[in-house]
Amino acid sequence: MVGSAWRQPYLAELTFGEMFRLVNSHVSGHKLRILEVGCGRGYLSLELARRGHDLLGIDVNGETIKIAKQTMNTDPYSLERGRLEYQVSDFDAWNGADRKFDLVIFNRSLHHIPHHIRRILEQGSWFKSDKKLSGNLGVSVAQIKEEWQASGRKQHLNRFKQMYGPLRTLFEEKHLSWEPYIFWDIITDMRIPSTDTEMAFARCLMAMEKALIERGAINPVLFCFSGENAQN
Ligand SMILES: C[S@@+](CC[C@H](N)C(=O)[O-])C[C@H]1O[C@@H](n2cnc3c(N)ncnc32)[C@H](O)[C@@H]1O
């Protein structure tokens, strides 16, 4: 909780809450069998199970699955929800493909992308970071870009074309939209002493990113794709 948006309800609402509503708006049908790949701590699988669907969440990280299971086991709605299961598995080597699912969800697991406005927060001592950015704007922007490109190279992150090409080949596209996401990374590390200021600032960042995406002023980094099996 400490190093994430879960540390404040209003930050969790703007990030995980918005994400759940976005995904849920593309889930139509009752009691669907859903596979969530890279489910992390499982909040999305849990919420979808609470809406009556049967969920299997898998993640390669055993620690996050442990947390997901703890949350599942202490869920006050456990008697009313659909079936919920979690597995530690690397999707690339997953051996459950003989099971049938109505829907497969990759939520923030096809790619990850980092930071920007961090520089401004850092200058106001509102950002927790080991590495300080340069006082020179051009140099600091180059520093931030290099940092996330290096992290992308290290993690072998997929680029949009590498994901979208296969998705369009395999599925009939039903929806494609670009969503704000850079602000997630900033609010995770910002440290604003007043909760009112922090909430207002987080909302402002999200609105700003949305507006910049709508105007085509920045390259968005998070897409929402939903498609149907082309063979159906
Ligand atoms: C940014 S996190 C998103 C977690 C969660 N879906 C969420 O939105 O909070 C990406 C997740 O993908 C998982 N992941 C990455 N590669 C994976 C793989 N090959 N198989 C299963 N999970 C994987 C990571 O362990 C991590 O939990």
Image (tube, rainbow, N blue to C red):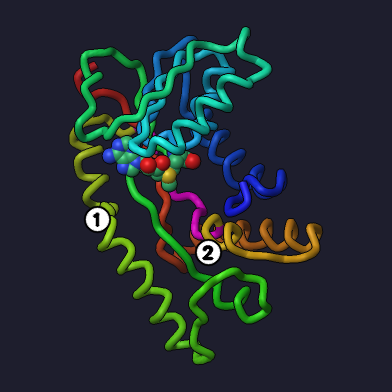
Tag 2: amino acid:
Leu
> Could you say which quadrant of the image residue 208 lies in?
bottom right
Instruction: Work out whether 128 lies above or below 196.
Output: below
Cα distance in 3D space between marks 1 and 2? 27 Å
Give the residue pinned by disc 1. 156
The magenta stretch is 174-183
> Which residue shows up at 65% across the image and 15% down it?
77
Q: Give the left or right position of residue 120, taking residue 105 as reference.
A: right
Q: Give the left or right position of residue 31, taking residue 111 as reference.
A: right
Which residue is more in the foreground, 121 or 51? 121
Where residue 118 appears, as percent x and y from the top left, is 55, 71
Q: Are marks 1 and 2 in contact (CB under 8 Å)?
A: no
Name the dominant secondary structure of the magenta segment. strand
Instruction: Work out whether 68 lies above or below 140.
Output: above
> Which residue shows up at 27% across the image and 61% down it?
154
Residue 47 visible in this rendered orientation of the protein? no
> Which residue shows up at 62% across the image and 62% down it?
205
> Could you say which quadrant of the image residue 216 lies in?
bottom left
Tag 1: amino acid:
His
Residue 200 falls within the magenta-colored stretch: no
Mark 1 residue CB less than 8 A from any atom of ligand 1: no
Which numbered circle lies on residue 179? none
Give the residue pinned by disc 2. 212
> Could you say which quadrant of the image residue 58 lies in?
top left
**Disc 1 packing (10 Å; few <14; some 14–19; many ≥20):** few
Quadrant of image for the C terminus: top left
Mark earlier in primary sequence (1, 2) = 1
Disc 2 is placed on an element classified as helix
Where residue 218 appears, as percent x and y from the top left, is 45, 66
